[in-house]
């Protein structure tokens, strides 16, 4: 399973949503509320060894598993450089 698939499965397990897809909106659809969102950010920071600032994240750039992975991959490259 590729990294996007792993992240999607991880999130699906957390939100108990069997048919979660990489482009399923989580925040804007209400699947994940703001409290759960903060928990995701903390978990993803630990899992990927990155720092995410909640003020920089929202439904416009961190709403789907695909968008989350894009942000994570970008930060992994810039924060390690």
Image (cartoon, rainbow, N blue to C red):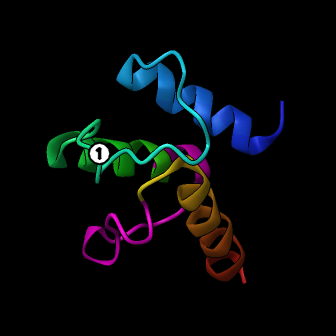
At 59% from the left and 63% from the top, the residue drawn is: 72
Q: Quadrant of the C terminus?
A: bottom right
The x, y position of residue 5, in whole percent, is: 72, 35
Asked which quadrant contains residue 19, the reply is top right
- Does residue 27 appear left or right of residue 9 in this picture? left
- Does residue 34 appear left or right of residue 79 in this picture? left
At 28% from the left and 67% from the top, the residue drawn is: 54
- Does residue 22 appear left or right of residue 37 in this picture? right
Magenta residue check for 41: no
Magenta residue check for 47: yes
Image height of 33 relative to 51, above or below: above
Image height of 24 relative to 53, above or below: above
At 23% from the left and 39% from the top, the residue drawn is: 36
Query: Which is more toward the observer, 23 or 80?
Result: 23
Q: Which residue is mark 1?
A: 29
Instruction: Report how many numbered discs are placed on residues in the image.
Output: 1
Q: Secondary structure at mark 1?
A: loop
**Residue furthest to the right:** 1
Density class for disc 1 (Cα within 10 Å; few <14, some 14-19, many ≥20) is: few
Q: Taken as a whole, is the magenta stretch helix, strand or loop?
A: loop
The x, y position of residue 18, in whole percent, is: 51, 15
Image height of 74 relative to 39, above or below: below
| Magenta residues (range) | 46-62
Q: Quadrant of the N terminus?
A: top right
At 40% from the left and 24% from the top, the residue drawn is: 14
The x, y position of residue 26, in whole percent, is: 37, 44
The x, y position of residue 48, in whole percent, is: 60, 51
Query: Which is more toward the observer, 81 or 24?
Result: 24
């Amino acid at each position: 399973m590729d990294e996007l698939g792993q992240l999607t499965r991880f999130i699906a397990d957390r939100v108990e949503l069997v048919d979660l897809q990489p482009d399923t909106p989580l925040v804007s659809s209400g699947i994940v509320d703001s409290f759960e969102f903060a928990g995701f950010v903390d978990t993803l920071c630990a899992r990927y060894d990155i720092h995410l600032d909640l003020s920089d994240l929202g439904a416009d750039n961190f709403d789907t598993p695909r968008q989350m992975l894009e942000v994570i991959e970008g930060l992994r490259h810039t924060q390690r450089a």
